[in-house]
Image (cartoon, rainbow, N blue to C red):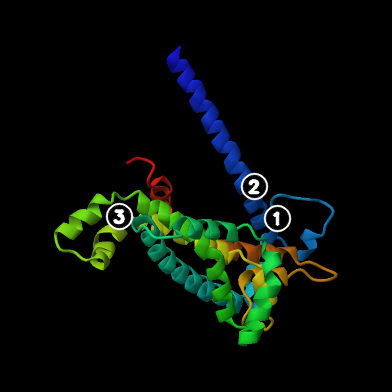
Amino acid sequence: MTRNATRSGSGVAYGLLVLSSLVVLVPVAWMLSTALKSSDELFSQTVRWLPLNPSLDAFARVFTDYPFATYFMNSIVVVTASTVIAIAFATFAGYGVSRFEFRGRGSLMTFLLLTQMFPSIMLLIPYFKLFQTLGLIDTRTALVIAYVSFQLPLCTWMMVGYFRSVPTELDDAAAVDGSGRIRTFFQIILPLTMPGVAATAIYAFISGWNEYLFALVLTSSEDKKTVPVGIGQLIGQYRIEWNDLMAASLYALVPLTLIFIFLQKRIISGMTAGAVK
C-alpha cells in the first residue's frame, strides 16, 4: 500500500514537471520556429509549427541590418557593472547588519524593503530630473546608477539572510586566534557564503538585463541603448518583422541561459543556504 502510494506520488510529480517544462519550452520553441521562417511564410494564412524552408537569414539580419551588437555590448557593460557594484555594497551591508548591533538597524531594513514597493513609473521622472541636472542623460553611467539603486535593497536583504546562516561562533573563534574583523570576513565568512553571493548576483544580473523602461527614457542615441530597447525598436509602425524580432529575442536569452547552465549548483546551494543549521 505504501509502495503503491509512493509510485502514484512520483507519477504525479513527474507529470507536473513535464507539464511545467512544456509551459516554459513551448513559447521558446515557437520563437525558434518563427525565427527560422521566411517573411512570406510568416504572413501566410496557413500556420505551421515547422517552417517549410528553414533559414538563418533572420539571425544574420539582426547584426547586419540593426546595431544589435552595440545594444548587446551596452547591456553587458551596464548590467555587469551594476551587478558588481550592487553585490559589493550588499555584501558589506549584509555582513554589518547580521553581525553588529546598532541603533536603527530594524528601521534600515524596513526602509530598504519599502523602497521595493514603489512602482518604477513613479520614480522615472525624479530619476530623469536628477540625471539631467548632473548631465548624465544618454550615458551608460546613468543606467548603472539607476540599476544599482534598484538592485541594492533586495540584494542586501538576501545577503543578510545568508550571513545569518553562518554561526557567529566562527567570528569569535577567529578573534581568539588574533584575526581582525576584516581578515575574518574575507578569509572565513565570505567563502562560506559564496553560494548566496552567486544566487544574489544572478538575481541582480537578470533584473538589470530585463530592465526596459529606464533604459528607454534615459538613453536616446543608438550607441547607448540596451538589448530590451533594441528589441522594442524592431516593432515598426505599420509592419513587424516577426522573424527578426524572435531571432533578437533568442539572442537575448543566451547570457541568461549560460548563467543558469554554469552556475546552477551555486543557485541551488544559495537557495537552500540557512535552511538547516
Helix, strand or loop at mark 1: loop
Helix, strand or loop at mark 3: helix
Q: Is residue 74 left or right of residue 49?
A: left
Task: Say what amino acid the circle numbered 3 marks.
Answer: Leu
Determine which residue is flagged by label 3.
Answer: 192
Q: Nearer the viewer, residue 209 or 40?
A: 209
The CA span between labels 1 and 2 is: 16 Å
Name the residue: 60% across, 37% down: 19
Task: Say what amino acid the circle numbered 2 marks.
Answer: Val
Determine which residue is flagged by label 2.
Answer: 26
Mark 3 and mark 1 lie on one chain; the one further toward the N terminus is 1
Label 1: how many Cα within 10 Å (few below 14, some 14–19, many 20+): some
Residue 212 seen in the current view: yes
Name the residue: 81% across, 51% down: 46
Callouts 3 and 1 close, C-beta under 8 Å: no
Q: Can you give x and y, in whole percent of width and height, for residue 45 in the image?
A: 85, 53
Task: Say what amino acid the circle numbered 1 marks.
Answer: Pro
Determine which residue is flagged by label 1.
Answer: 51
